[in-house]
Amino acid sequence: MSDTEVVIQQLLELNQRLLDSITSGDWQTYSELCDATLSAYEPEARGHLVEGMDFHRFYFDLDSGDGPRNTTMASPHVRLLGDTAVVCYVRLIQHLDAEGRPVTDRFEETRVWHREGDRWTHVHFHRSANA
Ligand code: GLY
């Protein structure tokens, strides 16, 4: 495996860890992987760019406990730009609807990571509406 392939694999694992921390409500892991100035466009922000961690913390604090969930990055693509990386994929979330039937939500996501020394930190993301 080339050095570039190793870095790409590392980024995919980090990104999956980030998504799994959201799925499991693990704020400690999520906040460790994110820069404090994280910027984001996501449907919850109603078309606004949100900055910082407070907006995201709100959802972790809800402790929804709404049954099993599984998150998959489908067809991931990683673009390395020196100490910056752009990770794109379709995020699939399997869960149960109100009647207990399995359903899958899908979102297009772009997540930007920045490397300082040996450490990659999540600095920006953009998620589409569920479609
Ligand atoms: N709303 C948290 C995240 O998708 O990173």
Image (spheres, rainbow, N blue to C red):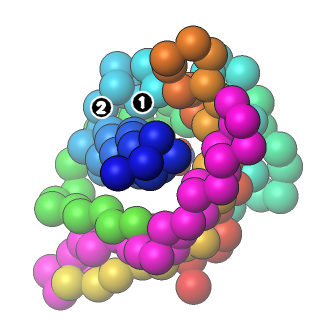
Residue 121 sits in which quadrant? top right
* Residue 23 visible to the viewer: yes
Mark drawn on residue 18:
none
- Tag 2: amino acid: Asp
Q: Residues within 10 Å of mark 1 (few under 14, many from 20)?
A: many
Q: Is mark 1 within 8 Å of ligand 1?
A: yes
Q: Helix or strand or loop: what does disc 2 sit on?
A: loop
Residue 26 is tagged as 2
**Pointers 2 and 1 in contact (CB under 8 A)?**
yes
Amino acid beneath label 1: Tyr
Q: What residue is disc 1 on?
A: 30
Image quarter of the C terminus = bottom right
Residue under the image location 66 percent in, 69 percent down: 128
Question: Percent position (x, y) of residue 84?
Answer: 70, 36
User: Residue visible at 33% across and 67% down?
Assistant: 72
Taking the spot 46% from the left edge, 41% from the top edge, the residue there is 3
114 vs 70, left or right, is right
Separation of marks 2 and 1 at Cα, in angstroms: 6 Å
| Percent position of residue 29, x then y | 34, 26
Residue 99 picture location, percent across and down: 19, 84
Q: Which residues are magenta?
A: 74-101
Q: Is residue 13 above or below residue 68?
A: above
Q: Is residue 25 magenta?
A: no
